[in-house]
Amino acid sequence: MFDERRRQAALEELGILDTPPDERVDRVARLAKEMFGVPMVSVSLIDRDRQWRKSQIGLGGNEAPRQDSFCDYTVSQDRTVVVEDASTTDLFAENPFVTGDPHLRFYAAHPLHAPGGEPVGTLCVLDTEPHTFTDAQQDLLRDLAFWVQTELAQDADVDHAAVVQRALRPRAHPEIAGYTIAAGAAPRGTLAGDYYDFSRHGEALRVTLADAMGKGTGPALVAATVRASLRTAPERSLSDAVIEVDRLLEDDLADTSMFVTAVVAELQPETGELEVIDAGHSLAFVVRADGSWTPLRSTNLPLGMGMGLADPRVPVTTRLEVGDAFICCSDGLLDVLDADDPFGHVERVLTAMGPDGAVREALRLANDERATDDITVVVVRRDA
C-alpha cells in the first residue's frame, strides 16, 4: 500500500533536495538522451507539492508542479511507466503538460528508490513526438535508473558518515593549567582518513594523531576503529594500548593491504614528561623555546602491517620545558610546505602566533592547489 508520509520522510532523509548539480548524475542523464534519442531527460524527485530535478536536459528549469505530473504518477505506481503517445491515451490526453507547454507526447520512466525501498523519484525520458519503446529499451532504462539511484544513495551514505566522523572529533580541547592546546583537521574530500584525539588517563593527557592510508569511507572507518580502541581500557600503558590496536588491525585488515601511521603520546602535565610512540609516522617534533627542532621517532612500523605482535612499541621520552611545544601533523601538510625548509614556515608562525595561529595557518594551507591529502595538526605548548 502506498504510504505518502513514509515516502516523503524517506526523501527528506536522503538530504538531496535543492543540492547543487552532480556530474555523476548528469553523466547518466546525457547517456540516456543519446541512447533513447530524446530531447528531454530528467532525474526528478517528488517533493510535497513539486517535482525537483537533480539533473535535467531540455526542460528549462529545476522545478515544476507536482500536480498532474507524469512522474508523480510513476512514483504512485512504483513501476516502469511508458506512454508512447500521450495524446491518444485516456489517462493523459487532457493533461496540462500534453495540451500545453511542453506538449508532451512520449514519456518513459522508472522509479528511483530510497535505501528503505520507498519510491522517491524517477529517471524519465521525454519527447514532443511519439516514440515506440521496446522491452530491451525498458530494461536499459531500468539499469540507468538503478545507476542513478546508487549514486544518490552513495551521496547520502557519505554525508551521514561525514556527520558521524565530525561527531567523533573532540568537542573541546582539554584545559590544563600551564599549557595551551590547539588542533584542527581539514579533509581533502568529504571524509578524512586522518584523525586526532585527546583523552585523560588519570592525571596524564593522551594525544593521538593517526593517518589511515588512502581517502574516503574505508580509511575513515579504519581511523574510527583506531580511535575507539585507544579510548578503551584507560588503565593500559601507552605501549600496551598501541600493541592492542596493532593486533586489531592485523586481524581486520589482513587482506586489504591497508595500514595506519600514528603518533600516540602521553604527557604528564605536572612535570612536562612526554612519552611518544611513533608508528611509522615520523612527523612528531618538539619545538624548543630557543627555536630548535627535535624529531621524536621510535623505530616502529605502521599499525596493521603484520608485525605488531613482535614489535615492542617502545616509546621515546622527552620533557617539555617552559616555552617548548609538542607538534605532530599528517603528511598532507608536507605537500604545501617549502620543500627546502619544510617546517620553517610553521616554526615562524608558531613563534609569532602561538599554537592556535599555527593550526589556523596549517589548515589555511589546505586550500593550496598543491594540497592532495587531508591535513591534521596538533600542538601542545607548555607555557608555565
Image (tube, rainbow, N blue to C red):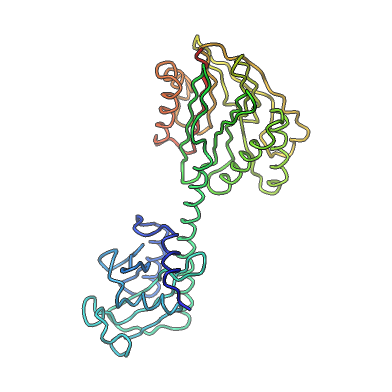
From the top left corner, tell me how far across and down residue 180 is, in percent. 49, 21
Tally of numbered tags: 0
* 42, 2: nearer the viewer: 2
Foreground residue among 313 and 306? 313
Horizontal and vertical percent position of residue 310: 78, 33
Name, please, the residue furthest toward the right.
310
Q: Residue furthest top?
A: 290
Q: Give the residue drawn at x 48%, y 47%.
A: 163
Left or right, 316 with respect to 104, comes to right
Q: Work out whether residue 302 or residue 165 is closer to the camera in this orientation and state it.
A: 165
Residue at 62%, 34% (x, y): give it.
261
| Residue for point 34% across, 70% down | 41
- Position of residue 10 relative to residue 170, above or below, is below
Quadrant of the image occupied by residue 236: top right
| As drawn, 39 above or below 295 | below
| Residue at 53% across, 13% down | 288
Q: Position of residue 228 (x, y in %)?
A: 63, 40
Question: In the visual, does 155 lie left or right of 130?
Answer: right
In the rendered image, the vertical position of residue 152 relative to residue 129, given as above or below: above
Snapshot quadrant of residue 125: bottom left
Furthest toward the left, the residue is 100
Residue 6 placement (x, y as % from top left): 45, 68
